[in-house]
Amino acid sequence: MPDQSAAPPSGESPRPARRRWASPFVLALIGALVGILGYVVIADPNGSGEQATTATTRPTPTTRADPDSVKVYKKILPSLVHIEGTRFPFIGVIGSGVIVNDQGQILTAFHVVDGLEGTINVRFADGKVSPAHIVSTDPDHDIAVLEPEQGPELIVPAVLGGGIRIGDEAFAAGNPLDLANSLTAGIVSGLDRTITREDGNGELTGLIQFDAAVNPGSSGGPLLDRDGQVVGIVTALANPSGRNTFIGIGFAVPIDTASGAAGGPDR
């Protein structure tokens, strides 16, 4: 009986069918190529052939603006004056003052220089020391003007201001407790205040009340606004305890009164 099965073409003998699987060698080769390609993309994303480095972000430097207190101090420092003298019986006196005109004249409190014996010495911010004499006084407003025999190397008069309000910033500069060229900060606490003089002889009127710290040695120093302009001359501190230490209330003669009463400094 003839064979009924189909014969393969071209007279080839029939072969069993094989499943088509990729060899393990091929798979390994493909995996290696993929890994190398991935490394190149990650390590050298720009295709430059150079090893890429991780970028680090650095903060941009910023310039910090000076606060008001720093600006005030820089402005007033060349004009500050340390005052020294002796009062009977051989009591050392210290006080503060401020240069107010091109002649180097110094505005201070009258009670700082009242009754001083011998030479009054003034020391400027640049360290120069000179004898000084009293040019004019106004005891009723506790104001005096000194003139040094020799001024500092560079005379820098302070800028005289005004127009302050309760609540405005206030800065007191001077030599409290003989700590030269100090600055304290506070606010204007009141205006047009009246206090009894320390010696009991009458009153001082029309004063600025402030809470920037002042102590013995601060008297005669400038009270400044936020622009570094002199708005008053420190004259007293409230001391109900009798210890002559600061308890949060100081007083200054307004600069209009101080500069006009003494008649010396230019405005």
Image: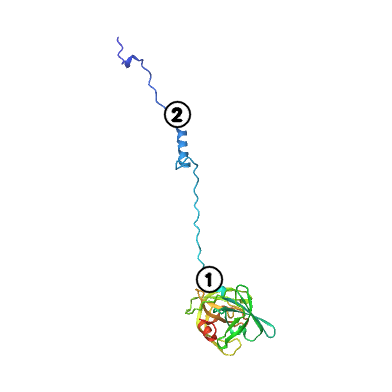
Q: What is the spatial separation of the Cα atoms under label 2 and label 1, in whole angstroms?
A: 78 Å
Side of 46 relative to 105 (left or right): left
Identify the residue at the far bottom of this view.
201
Front in this rendered view, residue 107 or 149: 149
Q: Residue at x 53, y 71 (%)?
A: 69
Q: Is residue 263 above or below residue 23?
A: below
Residue tagged 2? 26
Residue 198 lies, in percent from the top left, at: 60, 86
| Label 1 crowd (10 A; few <14 / some 14-19 / many >=20) | some
Q: Residue furthest top?
A: 1
Q: Earlier in the sequence, mark 2 or mark 1?
A: 2
Name the residue at the right extreme: 90
Q: Amino acid at mark 2?
A: Val
Foreground pick, 14 / 10? 10
Q: Is residue 152 above or below residue 58?
A: below
- Residue 260 appears at what percent x and percent y? 52, 85
Q: Residue at x 45, y 29 (%)?
A: 26
Counting every numbered tag in the picture gives 2
Q: Amino acid at mark 1?
A: Ser
Q: What quarter of the picture does the N terminus occupy?
A: top left
Residue that label 1 marks: 69
